[in-house]
Image (spheres, grey):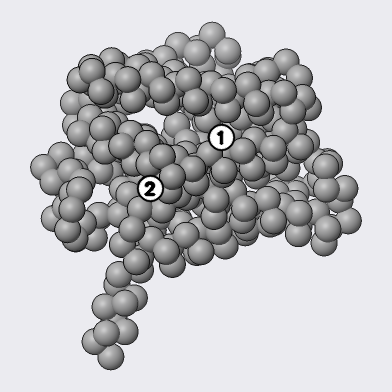
Amino acid sequence: MSSEKDTFKDYLPMFAMAGLILIVQVIALILASPMDELGMQAVENPESTANSFYYIGFILAFTFLLLLAIKRNMKWVIQLTILLAVGATIFYGFYPILYMLGISETLSSTVGIILAAALTIILYKFPEWYVIDIIGIIIGAAASAIFGISFGILPAIVLLSLLAVYDAISVYKTKHMIDLAEGVMDLKLPILFIIPKKRNYSFIKDGMKKEGEKDAFFMGLGDAVMPTVLVVSANVFIAHTGFISYPALGAVIGTLAGFIGLTIFVMKGKPQAGLPFLNSGVILGYIAGALLSGTPILG
């Protein structure tokens, strides 16, 4: 009986992590409609698969610059860059919500800037785990929604497939993604989700142990954002009635199924590439939802 309780208790943080992913997906679906109405797409032609390759190229270049900054002990450059990106993404999250509530574009923009600045300052001054998680939800949902309305079904599937391969190579082969994660961990930035394993855990004081038993579970924010891109895309580019299309619902279920598979390996105590599990799950879930609903797979 004791071991069963311990096992269930060990898995509770992973259930909470799955809940965070689901929250990001629901909020992203809500944001997608007003963002689409406001013309907030990141590209001119969402149906072009070339966008997927451009984005991969951008990720490679950005990762190289971050690793270079870490190697040269210029972490302040990373902190400044990410904080600016965080502030901008928070704004993109609040702006469409305020607009959706009937507030004028000018006032929505002004209030969005104020909220983004305030939350970014709070994050910088008090980067506790729950602050990072809350802001991570906001920027994760906003980023997912923007990319979701910017990538059609095929470009989204291509993007997620390429990212899954890249994530596997960067974690298992070159291991530079692990080096990058460890290099920026001390900066206490919202590029990850944190679920404590004990009540008195403090990310400010305890941080992330590199060796031995860890006091919290960590998941990169990209592991929530990337599968959600297809969830949003399947909801925006496929005609449907109601809040969510069947293919998008299948994508949500597929994401959670992929996360369960990821959890099984994570519980063994070794770093895992999340996107091969999550992206495979969301793509297969989308295809299943499309087939069951009689929707053409490519929309």
Q: Is residue 23 visible?
A: no
Q: Quadrant of residue 80?
A: top left
* Numbered disc 1: secondary structure: helix
Kindly identify the residue that appears in the image at 21 percent across and 56 percent down: 214
Density class for disc 2 (Cα within 10 Å; few <14, some 14-19, many ≥20) is some
Q: Nearer the viewer, residue 268 or 227?
A: 268
Which tag is nearer the camera, tag 1 or tag 2? 2
Q: Amino acid at mark 2?
A: Met
Q: How many marks?
A: 2
Kindly identify the residue that appears in the image at 61 percent across and 29 percent down: 147
Q: Nearer the viewer, residue 94 or 160?
A: 160
In the rendered view, would you say 255 is above or below 169?
Answer: below
The location of residue 252, given as percent across then percent down, is 62, 53
Q: Give the residue furthest to the front.
A: 173
Which mark, by number, is residue 144?
Answer: 1
Which mark, by number, is residue 219?
Answer: 2
Q: Give the residue furthest to the top.
A: 106
Q: Is residue 263 visible?
A: yes
The location of residue 254, given as percent across then percent down, is 63, 58
Q: Give the residue furthest to the left.
A: 205
Which mark, by number, is residue 292?
Answer: none
Density class for disc 1 (Cα within 10 Å; few <14, some 14-19, many ≥20) is many
Image quarter of the C terminus: top right
* Numbered disc 2: secondary structure: strand
- 58 relative position to 212: left or right: right
- 246 relative position to 17: left or right: right
Q: Quadrant of residue 246?
A: bottom right
The location of residue 92, given as percent across then percent down, is 51, 22
Q: Amino acid at mark 1?
A: Ser
The location of residue 7, given as percent across then percent down, is 31, 77
Kindly identify the residue that appears in the image at 68 percent across and 23 percent down: 51
Image quarter of the N terminus: bottom left
